[in-house]
Amino acid sequence: MWKNIKSNWPLVIIMMIILVVVLSNIITSTRPSTKEAFSASLDDSVWVAPSLYYDDVEGEERKKIIYGEELIANTSIYLGPKGSVAQISNGMNCQNCHLNAGKTNWGNNYSAVFSTYPKFRDRSGAVETIYKRVSDCFERSLNGTAPDSNSKEYQAIYAYIKWLGQDVKKGEKPIGSGIEKLPFLERAADPIKGKQVYTSQCQSCHGATGEGQLSLGGNSFEYPPLWGQHSYNSGAGLFRISNLAGYLHSNMPFKQSTHSNPKLTSEEAWDVAAYVNSQPRPSKDLSKDWPDISKKPFDHPFGPYADGFTETEHKFGPYKPIIAKQKK
Ligand code: HEC
Ligand code: HEC
């Protein structure tokens, strides 16, 4: 063998040169050199979050964007019960529900926020700005109070959300924005079946009593709470079972499920959502919500309603008859 190589050495060297050239071509072609090449290398049917690595935004604006992303990812460290800036929220992070700081498709991302706000929303019966929408999540999902609109913190969150949505045309919603809409069950969602799903698929991280698990320093959660006094309140978006089920189907169990490869069936997602949203949690005065009661979503669990269905039917379904009647 060695003899063979020795006698054919010019051929061996040529082969090795070819190999090096081919390999280096493969490497440079898979590492995009510009922002455009980066975007083009991905499937263009879904949204691609911008990256500061490729973006030339400079100075104060860049600092604001970085701080804004940090606040979304680690809200509790700055604004939680032991927050270093203020103590105005429940210990959860925005990112617990807006995964990867609002960049994950089907993970309740922020791709359509800058393009669609200000907009009229039925819940408040008014035109809402981005500030109002962010405040809503502070007051409901984080069961707290919002930072002032002039504060460095709100300005940073705004800069980050604006930057994230910069490539989305006004009025447009990219595929994968927000939360997956699951097909409806023919029956009502069942908290008893959901409890079994919870025990086998969720409890290992979120705990037997849904209280989550604090991280080592104790000023944020490693596994966020799903109910109890540190969880989202009764006015939060996830307290609607369709939102929770859709979020779970694409994203939980965490790091095992994806939108294209979910671990829960839709039936399991509806049932476990019914179970989680039947547990105790902080309540919020919702008397000012949905000033036009006929605009309440099919799964809003608090009456009065214009359609004659009960609170239990609205909360758990079956939803098809409710939607059919609302359409009339
Ligand atoms: C407990 C889960 C949860 C947490 C924590 C949370 N949110 Fe939300 N947020 C939601 C849900 C669910 C929706 C969608 C509600 C709906 O469509 O009814 C939403 C919607 C939004 C929207 C509007 C999105 C759109 O496309 O219209 C913004 C902006 C937002 N949240 C910002 C924040 C910020 C900032 C924080 C942290 C201060 C935060 N959220 C924390 C669950 C959460
Ligand atoms: C492997 C651990 C793990 C498992 C198993 C798991 N989760 Fe989670 N879950 C997480 C983590 C971590 C987050 C927060 C993600 C982040 O902040 O990036 C989260 C976030 C959530 C949230 C949004 C935040 C909140 O606290 O309300 C809900 C709701 C949720 N999980 C429900 C479930 C349900 C229901 C199951 C079972 C079907 C489940 N999870 C299984 C780790 C897990």
Image (cartoon, rainbow, N blue to C red):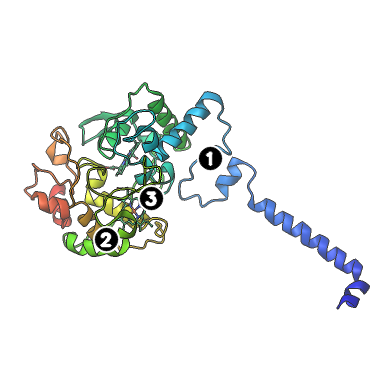
Q: Indicate the secondary structure of the residue bearing disc 3.
A: loop
| Residue 205 location, quadrant | bottom left
Residue 303: give its label: none
Residue 51: give its label: 1
> How far across and down, in percent of the image, does residue 268 sit?
27, 62
Sooner in the amino-acid sequence: mark 3 or mark 2: 3
The residues tagged by marks 3 and 2 sit, at their Cα atoms, a distance apart of: 21 Å
Residue nearest the observer in this picture, 200 or 14: 200
Residue 198: give its label: 2
> How far across and down, in percent of the image, does residue 47 sit?
46, 46
- Asked if the beta carbon under badge 2 is closer than 8 A to the nearest atom of ligand 2, the reply is yes
Question: Mark 1 and mark 2 in contact (Cβ < 8 Å)?
Answer: no
Q: Which residue is mark 3?
A: 106
Q: Indicate the secondary structure of the residue bearing disc 1.
A: loop
In this rendering, is residue 284 above or below 244? above
In this rendering, is residue 60 above or below 192? above
